[in-house]
Image (tube, grey):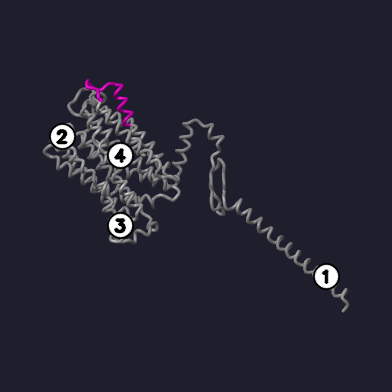
Amino acid sequence: MPKHAAKAKALHSHTEKSHSRRKSKTRVKMEDAPRRRTREQSSSSNDVGITIGGSGTHTPTQKYAFEIEDPASYAKLPLTDRVVKKWRAFYGNKDFGNITLLIALYWLQGIPLGLAHGSIPFLLKEKLSFAQVGLFSLAGYPYSLKLFWSPFVDSLYDRKFGRRKSWIVPIQLITALVFWWMGGHIDGLVRNPAENIYGIMYLFLAIVFLSATQDIAVDGWALTLLSKENLSYASTCQTVGINCGFFLSFTVFLALNSVEFSNKYLFSVPRDEGFLQLGPYLAFWAVAYVLVTLYLIVFKTEDSSSEDEAGSYGIAETYKTIWRICKLPHMQQFIIVLLVAKVGFIPNDTTTQLKLIERGLHREDMALAVLIDFPVQIFFGYYAARWSQGASKLKPWRLAFVLRLLCSALSMSVVYYFPQGGLTTGYFYVVLITMVASSMAKTV
């Protein structure tokens, strides 16, 4: 074959191969184009639904749905309308009933805490020494030691009745019985506290122990009772519920129990006793405990499918797991911090209010100060949970720790410079500001 014919044939073959490759690439691109368009449409219209100022609901083909409030329309609303809008959104929450139940359960826990850490020490201080009041303070220890028996609460339960209800229901019924018995006997014990200090201490020690055990079960139930998107409300429920119960048993009870307050605001004819005595107050809450417990038995069922893997652990394995966690280097440092962190302000928390009353602050003045302080606790309790959700979860705690130390020093100064001639209006405002600042730091 001539050379020029061979070159022409090779050139023609190369041209055909190049043309074939270009056609193949074009065909692949044309086939991929609809697929890419389909994926883009699916991603933009099916996978994610974004609504501005709308309902935020998603269609069956959408995986996620987001609702973005229209800033222009929201900024124009007055403050009251914005609060109402937030409340309506909360009321329409699918977990609204469960959130209300958690608040009620935590509320019941706050009742004995308000008595043991608030009202009873005030009532006893009028007739006892600080040493005897310190003996009664042992009644509050179960809340600090509940870790030691929490594995029993997590591991022992009746699966048919419910993992958490197996503990909450009997504990609340026992507490109701103790409250009902105390309703007929506690006033006589408190009238002669020096002779009955051990009996009073053991009674409240038992009640606080039951409340601490209930707290273990309720904290565990909150993790499965609320849906994942509403799990952050658990800490809010605890803050609101316990503070409300504490407020009723401390501030409200002290005010209604005070003879001066009752004669000034409630009685038309002066009397020798306050409007509300401790016995009837405990009897009332005994009935409230029974009603809430009956609701749990009759209307509330636990979802057995929500049990986590920890339910398969035995008691011994749970204690071993806790011990392994405690041996971690960072955990050991954290435990040391927790053991010594409160040394600087425990004296302020336990004795400042008692020393103020000893110096001349009336019980009704203290109740008024705590009444003003109560909304601050609720407000900062709510926002403390939100501030702790960022990257620096311990930053709010560190700032509040320094503030709490400063407030402790300020409280000691308030006690030391208390007016000798009695409480004045200006100094009452100083006491109030100190209590609010200290409570704000303590809540955070």
Query: Mark 3 and mark 1: span between their CA atoms?
Result: 81 Å
Q: Secondary structure at mark 1?
A: helix
Q: Residues within 10 Å of mark 3 (few under 14, many from 20)?
A: few
Report which quarter residue 151 is drawn in: bottom left
Three-letter amino acid code of the residue under disc 3 = Trp
Check the picture and name the quadrant holding the C terminus: top left
- The answer to whether residue 357 is above or below residue 4 is above
Marks 1 and 2, the one that precedes in the sequence: 1
> Do the residues bearing badges 4 and 3 touch, measured as CB atoms within 8 Å?
no
Magenta-tinted stretch: 417-435
Circle 4 residues within 10 Å: few <14, some 14–19, many ≥20: many
Residue 159 locus on image (x, y percent)? 32, 59
Placement of the N terminus among the 4 image quadrants: bottom right
Distance from the alpha carbon under mark 3 to that under mark 2: 41 Å
Relative to 418, 199 lies left or right: left
Amino acid beneath label 4: Gly
The residue identified by callout 3 is: 323
Q: Position of residue 12 (x, y in %)?
A: 83, 70
Residue pointed to by mark 1? 11
Say if mark 1 contacts mark 2, CB within 8 Å: no
Closer to the observer: label 4 or label 3? 3
Gap in angstroms between the C-alphas marked 4 and 1: 95 Å
The residue pinned by badge 2 equals 129
Structural crowding at the residue carrying mark 1, measured as other residues with C-alpha within 10 Å and reported as few (<14), some (14–19) or many (≥20): few
In the displayed structure, would residue 306 be above or below residue 434?
below
Name which quarter of the figure residue 422 lies in.
Answer: top left
Viewer-nearest of discs 1 and 2: 1
In front: mark 4 or mark 1?
1
Reading the image, the residue beneath label 4 is 245
Viewer-side residue, 27 vs 200: 27
